Image (spheres, grey):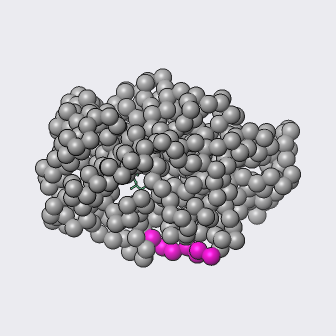
Amino acid sequence: MSEPSPDNSAGSGARIVDARVIVTCPGRNFVTVKITTSDGVTGVGDATLNGRELAVASYLQDHVCPALIGRHADRIEDIWQYLYKGAYWRRGPVTMTAIAAVDTALWDIKGKVAGLPVYQLLGGRAREGVTVYGHANGQDVAEVLDEVAQYLEHGYKAVRVQVGIPGLPVTYGVSKDKLFYEPAQKGIAPSEATWSTELYLRHVPGLFDAVRGKFGFGFHLLHDAHHRLTPTEAARLGKRLEEYELFWLEDPTPAESQDAFRIIKQHTTTPIAVGEVFNSIWDCQQLITERLIDFIRTTVVHAGGITHLRRIFNLAELYGVRSGSHGATDLSPVCMAAALHLDLSIPNFGLQEYMRHTAATDEVFPHTYWFEGGYLHPGETPGLGVDIDEKLAERYPYQPAPLPVNRLLDGTMHSW
Ligand code: KDG
Ligand code: MG
């Protein structure tokens, strides 16, 4: 077996002397990369891919980390290209999540070395804070209204609403724990959910009617259809909801079929947001350049890190598409910190999703970002302002927890 080729390239900074993967489950699973330089500076990157955590951990441990040793930590773009082009097998969630983690850790290191928060390295502050949306959900409309009231009391300026559908035992987005929605369930086999688009389309407009009727139009209202509709159904829903002035309707159809969005766009002015399962600029190229969406929801952890996500947002800016990054609980505080630095610095920021983590997760990942009056702020600490407490992380070993699968009422497999 040949040794990894040494990095003989010029570089002003320290070299990578250690890159390791930490898997921990403080309530839910997280995969984190920690990189150390010859100067003793460390950086962290999120590598969590919900339900497929160990695939990324192995990709990193077995293929990526060994190839990083000896490389100049300051050459972020070069290392990104080395990992992307060097693998031959490009793109895909596992590969791009692994690259994202390394990239994020290197930005953290660069910030620490420069003595600057990462947003300063990205061009500085383009706004005062990052507007975030919270998740109001409930089994029935009355429960959702109570939740919306709570979010508005906390100062949120944007709220996503999801409601249980009568006739379906469980519904995507409806949770027992109000602040921490977690669809992955511990165990080996995925749980099975059932779905009926007919029941959903009949019930869901009443939710928006009740929310706007009770609270008015003074805040952004959002909804996630979670990839379940056909283009025609999505067009019908978007049209039906126009009077409630949604900030966005998310993932109306499975987005690998990008031209399907032409049908949706031809029929409705409800803004469309897509992209949480995308991994690269190629996945969203048509949606952006044909102006088929209004918000691109790719994230740091699943779309190649700060380096690649910034490229996606730059492309989107040319076409008037704004950012709306995914920020569910399965994206660790390391990803959230990185997202906030990017959100603060880009010109075409739209909105950031923010599902709070549990106290146990926050303890394992101490961070400087904070919430105030509907905004998140990354803080002024050099780097990303987030770390992993490795000793504490050891107390929470990995537990298998797959995402559910989804079937129609007659048993046919459907998108979850
Ligand atoms: O791991 C899957 C979740 O991150 C996803 O279901 C959450 O759709 C989601 C959202 O918009 O937060
Ligand atoms: Mg979503």
Locate residue 350 relative to residue 77 in the image: left or right: left
In x, y percent, where is residue 408? 20, 61
Q: Which residue is drawn at 32% across and 40% down?
A: 221
The residue under the point 17% across, 37% down is 240
Q: Position of residue 83 (x, y in %)?
A: 66, 48
State which quadrant residue 212 falls in: top left
**Magenta part of the protein: which range?**
395-401
Question: Residue at image x 58%, y 75%?
Answer: 397
400 in the magenta segment? yes
Q: Give whichever of 181, 305 is nearer the camera.
A: 181
**Quadrant where the image shows the C terminus:** bottom left
Magenta-colored segment: predominant secondary structure: loop
Magenta span includes 91: no
Q: Position of residue 131 (x, y in %)?
A: 47, 38
Q: Residue furthest front?
A: 153
Residue drawn at (38%, 65%) of the image? 177
Residue 196, relative to residue 346: is it above or below? below
